[in-house]
Image: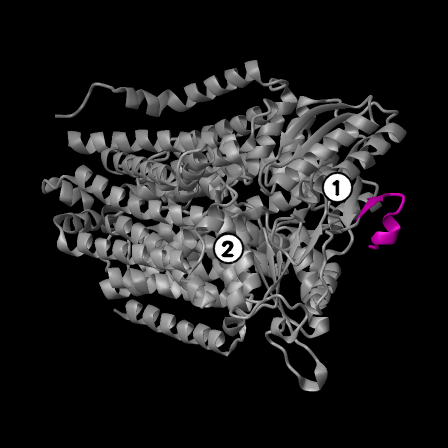
Amino acid sequence: MEQTKKTWIDYYKKFGIYIFLAVVFVFFAIFAPNFLSSNNVINILRQVSMFGIVVVGVSAVMIGGGMDLSVGGQMAVVGMILGYLMVNLNLGIVPAILIGILTGCIFGSLNGILAIKLHMAPIIVTLSMMLVLQGVAYLITGGYPITGMPEGFTRIGQGYIGIIPVPVIIFLLFVVFGWIVMNKTYLGRHIYALGGNKEAARLAGINVDKLTIFIYAFTGFAASIAAVIMVGRTNASQPGAGSSYPFDCMTAACLGGISISGGEGKISGVVVGVIILGILDNGLVLMGVNSNFQSVVKGLILLIAVAIDCYQGGKKKRIK
Amino acid sequence: MINISFFIRQISLITLLTVGVSLEMIGGVIDLAFAAQLSASALVGVSLIAGGCPVGVGCIGILFFNFCLGFLKAVFLVKLRIPSIIFTLAMQVILSNFLLVTVDYTGIVIPGLQESYRGNLYTVVELIITVFCVAGAFFFLEKTYYGKYCRMLGEDLPLARENGVKCFGISVVVHLFSSFFFSISAAFLMFRTGSSNSALGATYLYQILTAVFLGGILPGTGKGRILGMASGALAVTLGVTFLTGSGYLYRFENILEGSIILVALALGIRKKN
Amino acid sequence: MIKKLLSMLLGMTLAATVLAGCGSAPASEKAQEPAAEAGTEETAKNEETAEGSKSYKIGFLAPTLQTEFFISIDDGLKTECADRGWEYVSVSFDNDSAKAVTNIENMVTGNCNVIIAMVSDSSCDSALADAQAAGVKIMECGVQTEVYDVCLNTDQYQVGVSIGEMAAEWINSQLGGAGKVVVYTTVQNQDMQNRGQGIQDAIAENAKEAEILEVVDIGKDVVGSGTSTTENMLQKYPDLNCIVCYGDAAAVESMEAAKAANVDVENFGIFSCDGTAQAMAGIKAGDPQKGTIMFAPLAPMMAEYAERVLNGETFDEVITAETISITSANIDEYYTE
């Protein structure tokens, strides 16, 4: 018999993220000094822009039933390559960015190929890739950061168009692109189908292998764009960049309603999840809270979000 | 003699951790939190001793703390059905950052503790304890029903559930048994350094995972042998010793660990097919 | 099956290598000999007697080899050892005392003659004592415990005072004393906490009219944390005009964030420590970065004292590493583009 009565989980899935956003916003508006100002809102958006771009990519992978923990390592290597090309080899900004993006796509594709060939949970494969890429990032310059980017490059990370920072504009464009792909194209539907039931998708005629590689390549693309912005923001390529991204991206995606088991979730929810984490980071700093405590809070958020998702998944199976 | 002593101490610790993590992985759990668990439990022990309790009470505190965490893992992973790697990743972040908030990297040092438990006699004691623990793990895995059910859980948890296996009970037993190994390891670390901080043992995370995969234990298969675990531990101990002495460790450690895990996965899949 | 065979083969090969190394090294024999005599042949494990030249092996143990400060020491030691014809190895323990103990043991196994240990506390004393018993000379840097043959140390509180004094001088001369200051510190270890306290005390002492608005724990070395924290601080304190950091890593990110926020560069000062290239470039270019503390080159000093201790000298006093305050007044002496 089909369950018609809505449970609290159904309401949570539909509205919970927005309620949580409102609660967090009001809390910090009351308790964090100087939180409620247009400058601070711009601040928050700028700080989450790089992270948000990567989360869009990771969300696509998760909706497709996979996971990518190597995004931080990809960002670090791409950032180092960017710096090396522009500073050490005096390559122009545009060619360097294009090579960086290509590198990111290659790393992403490699993740997809390994996930397919090894028939192992992508989370383990990408965990291994994360280790390898972290090591490679340090090898490029022996651990030294590369500084002194060309004039004009830093505008990508520090510039404005009107009153809106450039990273925020790139982030918004990415979100719109992601939303269109996932909601208005066959590609998006195929990704949902892949995450919902891989075998059924394959039997329906979807080339699951190619699609998997494409999704991971897209995440690599997202990571490379984020790396470009990060290098622009800090005016330096750091081998340790992106170290906290794997965990934070997963937290934002799960908070935004992306199901761990795949096939569920919306880009709009992910954006809200990203903004919530941005508000938390910003608000806790304004309140003078220890940065490690912020990580504890994020860990608890991830646990609760995944627990609810798994509980709902288990209930659905029991009802069937 | 001193070199052999060093080697024995290192391999004892790595073997205990490898066996503990492997038992969990055979049961279907990929544990990324055990390193943070080491730090936290060692800190519990050190705090008790620094607070005036006898050393034995400190060790019991370590055991109790690890048992609680092991039970928690069983609850979240089997009852709430959260994917193990995500739960343990969250647990690792929460534990390590909570420790940083409370005691930071400075931690607690107990003067005289490491001096009291130093020397070849204690090295031999550590080795004997390790051998007994590994023998116990062998008996558990190969000669008891719990071992068999543990493999069933690791191979196909939903099927085991459908067949009436008491998954939660088995999972609790497996995690408590693994926690016992982590407790012994935490105690060894505590005695070896006479201290604990938020990072004690944290660097073993990927070394031990490498040893586990190298030993032929793969997630989702329910397969694994004590001999494999010991081989993996031996290979990693010797690898770390050799690479440290030749100065290549810090440059290539991450790359080697990641590559070895990938290669081990690839070989494991070929064998499976 | 293949994997088990591979891992056993790998294990046996490595075992043979290590045991061969152990067997040929006099270290295991030296362990029985008293270490009372200094500067004798007993301490030179890898001694070659070709025309009287001596070849030693130096091991460097650092808390991390992922920050510019320690990487530069590592590179400097590599060069110094190469110039002297010595072997050199380096390892990091990533703030994990257990790994530090293991690394010390493995460096003894690897036949190091001197271990330069930048440990954090006394948790490695047993391992260092075992190394001494094996004939290895111990040089402690950055912390003074009970076990060392020579100790190079810098009072981190005084380093913090130097940073604070540099900032206070600028606040008084440029801002007429009206400084609104935020201090970035970290709880990485006791040394950094001491440094942070030194900064605060020096500002309070030397710029009495300045106000320390907040002391921020900027956390571990997470790339981007300096940038986002500075953006948040500028938001929280619109009249903020001085940031004093425990290290250049956070400071240079703050510099970029401050520039992006279009602060008045002349009247906004950032001060820190480490003397990295990016920080000095900022001082030279007239950016918000106004000063940094540079340590006198540590690597040559370490190599020099390693040589002296291997030659039998003993050191009862702790050797202090000098620091240099670098501002726009003397930047040209230490930095060229």
- In percent of width and height, residue C228 lies at 62, 34
Which chain is home to disc 2? Answer: C
What residue occupies the far top of the structure in this picture?
A30
- In percent of width and height, residue C132 lies at 57, 62
Magenta run includes residue C326: yes
Q: Is residue A105 visible?
A: no
Q: How is the image coloured?
A: one colour
- In percent of width and height, residue B79 lies at 23, 33
Residue position for label 1: C159
The quadrant in which the C terminus of chain A is found is top left
Residue C85 horizontal side relative to residue A257, left or right: right
User: Of helix, strand and loop, which one carries label 1?
Assistant: helix
Query: Callout 1: 10 Å neighbours few (<14), some, many (20+)?
Result: many
- Residue at 73% across, 56% down: C298
Nearest the viewer among C70 and A150 is C70
Q: Is residue C118 above or below residue B7?
A: above
From mark 2 to mark 1, how far is it between C-alphas? 28 Å
Which amino acid is tagged 2? Val
Q: Earlier in the sequence, mark 2 or mark 1?
A: 2
Residue position for label 2: C101
What residue occupies the far left of the structure in this picture?
B163
- In percent of width and height, residue C165 lies at 81, 35
- Residue at 57% across, 68% down: C34
